[in-house]
């Protein structure tokens, strides 16, 4: 996968000297814009670039020859973006994508939007037609700067070769400072081909409007502590922001000091270990019944890096009625966006919690924890083997084998919710899932990115038969790079989540959900050189899963599960936690159509 | 500033960089705010620009819009301004039909409305006027009977009173 040559090493040193000497150097020894770009990426510690080449990006691909950055050729640009996303979530470092102009660039849009919705740092480099042809409908010209504007944290259209180092430096700073997000850099071919004559590859940044907060105001934090100290039934709600700010230890200390139960969002999984007795697991639409019960009963809820989104707060008017509400977030725009809070602190979650711990008292929550234990016993997550192999059985067995030690990347749909329920996550970096965007096709490439970033970890992609088929061509990528990613395809031959809604709320009028005629996934894997395993019975599920996970190379586990199964508990979209459906409704029970967002 | 019809005046101090205008406009458009007028001009330091935007929409959404605008990398600060704290002015050009007798009447009105003739030809006269939006509205009403052929207004310009930064 590396492209190292000794020749290029000598070339690089001469080029570096030339760059410092700048203008007077002869043309052939001068850096091009593309070479300056790659040097800057190297200086930012970039290990990998995931991309797909094309005409407008050739100068950049050319500059990668001999670079210490490993270029990984994907099969589709969406794959590159999700791989970079998975790498970023697993390592905390921005993932870098390099694609060409036009369709190459537009194919990354879903991946960029996915990263933006979930606050994932990413740098997307797009080739562009030559500057004089901009706006003239040149071959493979697309206004990617304009197209992506609503889904990036920031973006650049480079107009001068000498601006490249500053823009790259700013892009890295922006993408991973404050609330992270994707930054796009559109690079016209004449700009990357032209000689670089700037003074420095490490110039000053020019970002007068970008000053994200770090530690919160002590007065705000004291106000929060006061509310906690008066609470009898407090609840911590941990989101992705807590993981991004590496606040895990602080959350643990805070929870333990106050004897306060903790629930987490889908993306907050693992920040507080889900095996801890104080953990209630995931809350929300398909969260645990006890987490949602806690939501209805708490007298204080404190969100740490979550944005009260509509999967956990379907009906804002009825959200935690009577409870004091606290919001800790680094993004001031999240304050009051959905929930009006009694106290807020804007800043880095870890720094705020470290200060908050000093001001809170141990609380007497015995009765509260006893009540929650009752809910845990009364309404546990459960499934039955009666009708045959279920997704829950597969995911339960997966948890029994991996015990929270593997990195799990999920796709989107029923399997994602079951995985969230049954995989007890111990660390935030070990759970990758597209939450805000709900991007089908995310899981498998995200797992690839995680495996690149964490080569020693066991990485498992849990995907559905629908979503997997959207990005499965990256099987080539794991085969070529010998990445031991394990793919568990939960195959129910349906787009199961939509089928569930149609069954429950639309009189079982199935429309556009039948995936009958799926390929033979084992043969498909083997066609790509990936080892295939097949599971279709409860009896051999655990054993075959264990065998497949032990396999040294890349492997696909095709789990054929019962076709019609529904995820419960469920809070229908637009409803409140108290309206949660815990048990499957009887056949003749009529449920009204959900009014909330999707 | 919350006035009739939920019209708000928002001032943005932005880095003078490509794309900043459309990024700001998108923040409004995505949330269903209709921009009534928008003025962009260089600040004292030419690296920055000032934008004054008047827009219609519900006040709850407005708070989000200001925060989301401020969050944009190139926006240094974003603020809503009330009429009491600011000097608000507009500029207008009106092309009005005239006859000799009408012209005499028009000319009499000009000083009252802080307006003057910018150009005069046989059949039409172009009048310029600076003032508050209310003054411009009133003058427009006065001119209507003569026959306004064209009108263009600059949109609101806003500056904070006293030492406070706009």
Image (spheres, rainbow, N blue to C red):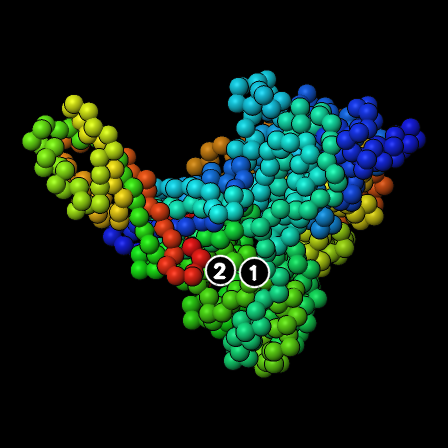
Q: Is residue A438 above or below residue A104?
A: below
- Viewer-proximal residue, A571 or B131? B131
Residue located at (73% from left, 31% from top): A196
Tag count: 2
- Residue at mark 2: A335
Q: Earlier in the sequence, mark 2 or mark 1?
A: 1
Q: Residue at x 62, y 41 (%)?
A: A183
Q: Is residue A130 above or below residue A218?
A: above
- Inspect this view and state whether residue A58 appears: yes
Discs 2, 1 touching: Cβ within 8 Å: yes
Q: Residue at x 71, y 39 (%)?
A: A165
Residue B78, image x, y percentages: 45, 52
Q: Which residue is mark 1?
A: A329
Which element is circle 2 on?
A: loop
| Image spot of residue A540 (x, y percent) | 75, 45
Q: Residues within 10 Å of mark 1 (few under 14, many from 20)?
A: many
The reply to whether residue A104 is in sight is no
- State the residue in front, A256 or A492: A256
Q: Are marks 2 and 1 on the same chain?
A: yes
- The image shows residue B13 at horizontal and vertical percentages of 47, 49
Mark 2 Cα within 10 Å, few/some/many (few <14, many 20+)? many
**Which chain hosts label 2?**
A
């Amino acid at each position: 996968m590396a492209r190292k040559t000794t020749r290029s090493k000598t070339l690089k040193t001469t080029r570096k000297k030339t760059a410092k000497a700048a203008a007077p150097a002869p043309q052939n020894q001068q850096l091009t814009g593309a070479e300056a770009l790659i040097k800057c990426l190297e200086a930012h510690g970039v290990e990998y670039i995931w991309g797909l080449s094309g005409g407008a990006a050739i100068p950049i691909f050319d500059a990668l020859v001999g670079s210490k950055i490993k270029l990984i050729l994907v099969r589709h640009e969406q794959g590159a973006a999700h791989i970079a996303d998975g790498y970023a979530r697993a390592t905390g470092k921005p993932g870098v994508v390099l694609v060409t102009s036009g369709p190459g660039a537009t194919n990354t849009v879903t991946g960029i939007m996915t990263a933006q919705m979930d606050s994932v740092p990413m740098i997307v480099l797009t080739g562009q037609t030559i500057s004089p042809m901009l706006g003239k409908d040149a071959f493979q010209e697309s206004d990617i700067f304009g197209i992506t504007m609503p889904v990036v944290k920031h973006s650049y259209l480079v107009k001068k070769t000498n601006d490249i180092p500053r823009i790259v430096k700013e892009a890295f700073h922006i993408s991973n400072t404050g609330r992270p997000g994707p930054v796009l850099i559109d690079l016209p071919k004449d700009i990357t081909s032209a000689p670089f004559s700037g003074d420095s590859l490490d110039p000053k940044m020019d970002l007068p409007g970008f000053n994200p907060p770090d530690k919160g105001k002590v007065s705000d934090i004291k106000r929060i502590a006061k509310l906690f100290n008066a609470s009898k039934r407090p609840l911590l709600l941990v989101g992705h922001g807590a993981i991004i700010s590496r606040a895990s230890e602080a959350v643990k200390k805070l929870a333990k000091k106050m004897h306060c139960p903790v629930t987490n969002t889908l993306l907050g999984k693992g920040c507080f270990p889900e095996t801890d007795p104080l953990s209630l697991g995931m809350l929300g639409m398909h969260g645990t019944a006890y987490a949602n019960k806690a939501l209805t009963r708490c007298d204080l809820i404190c969100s740490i890096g979550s944005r009260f989104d509509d999967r956990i707060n379907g009906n804002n008017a009825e959200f935690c009625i009577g409870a004091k509400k606290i919001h800790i977030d680094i993004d001031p725009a999240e304050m009051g966006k959905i929930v009006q809070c009694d106290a807020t602190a804007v800043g880095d979650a870890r720094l705020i919690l470290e200060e908050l711990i000093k001001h809170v008292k141990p609380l007497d929550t015995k009765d509260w924890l006893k009540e929650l234990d009752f809910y845990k016993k009364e309404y546990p997550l459960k499934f039955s083997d009666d009708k045959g192999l279920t997704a829950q059985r597969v995911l339960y067995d997966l948890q029994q084998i991996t015990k929270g030690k593997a990195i799990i990347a999920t796709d989107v749909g029923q399997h994602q919710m079951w995985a969230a329920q049954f995989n007890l996550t111990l660390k935030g970096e070990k759970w990758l899932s597209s939450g805000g965007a709900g991007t089908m096709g995310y899981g498998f490439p995200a797992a690839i990115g995680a495996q690149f970033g964490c080569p020693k970890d066991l990485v498992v992609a849990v995907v559905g038969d629908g979503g997997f088929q959207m990005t499965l061509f990256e099987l080539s990528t794991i085969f070529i790079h010998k990445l031991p990613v394990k793919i568990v395809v939960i195959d129910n031959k349906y787009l199961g989540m939509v089928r569930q809604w149609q069954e429950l709320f639309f009189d079982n009028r199935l429309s556009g959900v039948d995936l009958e005629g799926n390929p033979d996934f084992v043969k498909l894997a083997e066609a790509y050189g990936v080892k295939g395993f097949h599971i279709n019975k409860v009896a051999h599920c655990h054993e075959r899963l264990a065998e497949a996970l032990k396999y040294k190379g890349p492997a696909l586990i095709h789990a054929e599960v019962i076709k019609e199964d529904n995820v419960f508990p469920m809070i229908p979209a637009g409803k409140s936690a108290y309206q949660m459906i815990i048990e499957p409704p009887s056949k003749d029970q009529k449920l009204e159509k959900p009014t909330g967002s999707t | 500033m919350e006035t009739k019809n939920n019209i708000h005046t928002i001032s943005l101090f932005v880095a003078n960089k490509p794309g900043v205008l459309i990024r700001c406009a998108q923040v409004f458009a995505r949330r269903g705010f209709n921009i009534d007028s928008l003025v962009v001009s260089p600040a004292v330091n030419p690296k920055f620009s000032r934008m004054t935007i008047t827009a219609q929409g519900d006040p709850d959404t407005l708070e989000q819009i200001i925060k989301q605008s401020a969050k944009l990398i190139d926006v240094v600060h974003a603020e809503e301004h009330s009429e009491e704290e600011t000097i608000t002015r507009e500029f207008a050009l009106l092309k009005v039909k005239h006859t000799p007798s009408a012209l005499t009447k028009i000319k009499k009105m000009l000083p009252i409305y802080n307006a003057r003739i910018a150009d005069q030809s046989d059949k039409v006269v172009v009048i310029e006027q600076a003032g508050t939006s209310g003054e411009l509205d009133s003058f427009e009403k006065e001119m209507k009977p003569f026959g306004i052929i064209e009108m263009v207004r600059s949109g609101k310009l806003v500056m904070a009173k006293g030492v406070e930064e706009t």
